[in-house]
Amino acid sequence: MAQAVAHGGGHVTSTGTSNRKLMMWIFLGSECLFFGSLIATYLIFAGDVIHRGVGPFPHPVTINGEHHEGILDIPLTSTSTFVLLMSSVTMVFAVYGAQHARPKMMKLSTLATIVLGVVFLGFQAFEFATFYHEGLTLGTNLFGASFFVLTGFHGTHVAVGALYLASLLAASFRRNGLGHEAGEHMEIAGLYWHFVDIVWIVIFTIIYLIPSE
Amino acid sequence: MATIAGTLTQPASSGIWSWITTVDHKRIGALYGVTAFIFFMWGGFQALLIRTQLAVPHGVVIDAKLFNELFTMHALTMIFLAVMPLGASFTNYLLPLMVGARDVAFPRLNALSYWVFLFGGLLLTSSFFFGAPDGGWFNYAPLSSKQYSPGPGITFYAVGLLILGVSSLMAALNFATTIINMRAPGMTMMRLPVFVWMSLIISFLLILALPPLTVALLQLLFDREYGTHFFIASEGGDPILWQHLFWIFGHPEVYILILPAMGIVSEVIPVFSRKPLFGYPAIVFAGVAIAFLGWAVWSHHMFTTGMGAVPKTIFATNTMIIAIPTGVKIFNWLGTMYGGSLRLNTAMSFSIAFIALFTIGGISGVMHASPPVDMQHQDTYFVVAHIHYVLVGGAVTAIFSGIYYWFPKMTGRFLDERLGMLHFWLWFFGVNLTFFPMHYLGLLGMPRRIYTYDAGLGWGLWNMVETIGAYVLAASILVFVWNFFKAMSQPQTAPANPWDAATLEWATSSPPPEHDFDVVPVVRARDPLWHDRDHGIEPAQPTGEHIHVPPPSYYPILIAAGMTVMAMGPLSHLALTAIGAVIVVYGIWGWALEPTE
Amino acid sequence: MAHAPSTGHQEQHGLTPRQYIMLGLALTLITIVELWVSYSGMARSVLITVLVVLSAVKFAAVVAFFMHLRFENSLMTKFFVGSFLLAVAILFALLGLFWGDLQPARIALEAVSGH
């Protein structure tokens, strides 16, 4: 009857899952709606651009017998997609290392994840700069607006994730490392990182892989 | 900060610094409540100006520009800065007590939610100095574009709502986690008080409905400041997209506003009827059903945009179906009162008034669920009557019921019953006097959001009646404020359970100690205190175990300040956003490294 | 989860390092197949279907195994899958509202009412 229930550090909870992990999963549900709304906007406008005939266009398209090149560089972005996918694999090993008391594995994998994330952002910066020089800006047409806002906010999520992991990596060099909850800290950061990766899986398919009519 | 149970009194810490650094859900609840009530009176003052201008034809009290700013800011203030945070105030204060926890899951995050709300509210309100938003609270394009609203008002609207959304999202994540994960032993989901159930539903509605609004606000911000044309039809954009994204949020939002009220009423009515709530599972599932259906009705705000027959039919049907779970709830409350021994004090009177007034608002809601009827109601005072019956007659009336009911628990003092009944009757007559004639005016064709009207239209009488009603409402609020200060000057005489209520918050002292419960209660039934009373079960004695209370922290207010600086970037210079981001990151580092054990 | 090289033991918490690498390789492979499909010039409806199915498999594999959702309390699966499905439902509703514009329905209605 008098059993103590310690709610404090998330040790004993009603569901057996820690508060932090539960909250992260619920938060990722919220993020689904965020990116869902951005993707809906993109899909609504990407086709409209062709009907209005105001380029640049995402994919090669023929309008009134005139052929227009697509602006998207699919081989380039496939490479950056591969980089982000690999960062998910290294992230898994960072979590694995933290959970199995292998700090060296954790630190190296975290570092690799951060580097891969930054490389992905580098690809994106290059892509944005190229588009800008080719005449696609936020204001050019609705493809530009919805493309930059969607991929830009995804990039922001990658940047936040890289900063998050860098903070954890820096903290892991303290005397106590990440403390007795190191595995959980890394796991929750990993949830966020993987989510950003799966959002890119969707974006890559919808923006890059599906050609225009 | 840890101390021994049983010997613990209220912490010696007081003064402004202890409030700034507090992470105690009860203190944060009090901060939410007081702040939101001040915003409520500010929003009410704006309404009085509006009503004074409209009292007679060709009013000359304020000009058209200020009128536009006032009706926009009145709605934003009342919805985002008053009614939502008043609900959050109750949730903050009561949720851990009701589930038998010692605090919310993330106490510092809770403090952060409050400070972000406060700063966001101040940021939005400060727009009056620079040119307030003037496009109405749903801010339709193209009125929201730079072309038609060149001042900074709409940008204030976008960043203000974005930052308030962050606050609401953090609070909702915190509440949802607390309810799911921090229930006392024996507190199963189907034993949760209905107020807690409604809080859980609201939390999920916020978590899922805020992102579409966030996206719409970001697109609006980019349209205005960074050269995109999402909502500019002449450049290939689509103003209807704003309407869809806004109402995908906006319709769940009205349930976010009304469900706390339904939760409060579901707590008050059983206690003052001396009967357990009639049909507990039905009322819970009705709440879930309302939230679920609430996702598939948003376009009923947009019937006049020309959607085609099929979507109109779908959205109209779904909207009408929502009347069923709502009706279930109303009959559950009536069934609870039926055959009970009613105590018609102030709290109970407000709850009963809620049922009546909310039903009127609900019925007019079903009326414009029908597209042909809605085409007539659109943008007339009939719609204004509907939303005010639901929000003022519904949500705010129930909030007053909750204030009178939980005041002894929160402060250890009682609000005066005679002043309370005066407050109640002024309020009840004021609501009907102000808002019922709006039905007539709407059907007579008076459009909403006009700053004056011609004498020959025959609208003068009812407008005058409404203005008188608005001043009656103001008087009732003054009576309440008087009552509040009178009560706060009294000694703390309230016992732990003055109303002989059934839920766990009444198992601890009034006001509760900082750690809420000396012993975490064990729950054996849906009405735990009545069950224990009837079965002669005495509360467990403190064992002297070590109770951990989270230490205070100044990082929440620091991070909130950083977020506000970030939000000011689009209004002035983007460098501010960068500086704010640095403050936020620094604050999060400090937060993460701060010891909490 | 037809695709992932899981042994599917419920007690097991996560995969082994070797399995993670295999899964990473499989995901890369799917991405290459997707690229090939994208350039294959097959009929648009088929192409879109194949691509959506393939990326759904990738999505599910990352969520289930990299994010451990398969090994967690089922409550979190309900929350996440529920939120995801809501997002998809709203997406399709919006696309229907914007793309369809429901001209066929309107024409049919006008035909019935004799205009």
Image: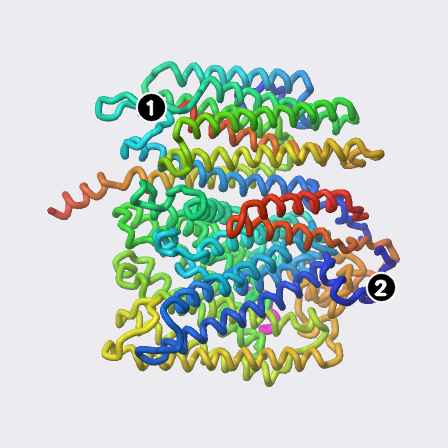
Q: Is residue C105 left or right of residue B563?
A: left
Q: Please give left or right for residue B317 compared with residue B394 in the image.
A: left
Q: Is residue B276 magenta?
A: yes
Please state which of residues B402 and B61 is positioned toward the viewer in this rendering: B61
Instruction: Name the residue at 48% across, 33% down.
Output: A151
Secondary structure type for disc 1: helix
- Pointer 2 and pointer 1: residues touching (CB < 8 Å)? no
The kind of secondary structure element at disc 2 is: loop
Task: Give the residue at x 64% y 42%.
Answer: A22
Asked if residue A168 is positioned above or below residue B99 in the image, the reply reads above
Q: Residue A48's quadrant in the figure?
A: top left
In the figure, residue A118 lies in which quadrant? Answer: top right
- Residue A133 vertical position relative to residue B505 in the rendered view, above or below: above
**Rendering quarter of residue B260:** bottom right
Q: Residue at x 50, y 38 (%)?
A: C84
Amino acid type, label 1: Ser
Q: Residue B172 at what x, y percent from top left?
A: 59, 51
How far from the left and from the top, in percent, is residue B520? Answer: 77, 56
Disc 1 target residue? C45
Q: Which mark is residue B8?
A: 2
Query: Mark 2: which amino acid?
Result: Leu
Range of residues picked out in magenta: B269-278
Render colour scheme: rainbow
Q: CA distance from mark 2 to mark 1?
A: 70 Å
Q: Is residue B203 magenta?
A: no
Whether residue B179 is visible here, answered yes or no, is no
Q: Are marks 2 and 1 on the same chain?
A: no
Label 1 crowd (10 A; few <14 / some 14-19 / many >=20): few
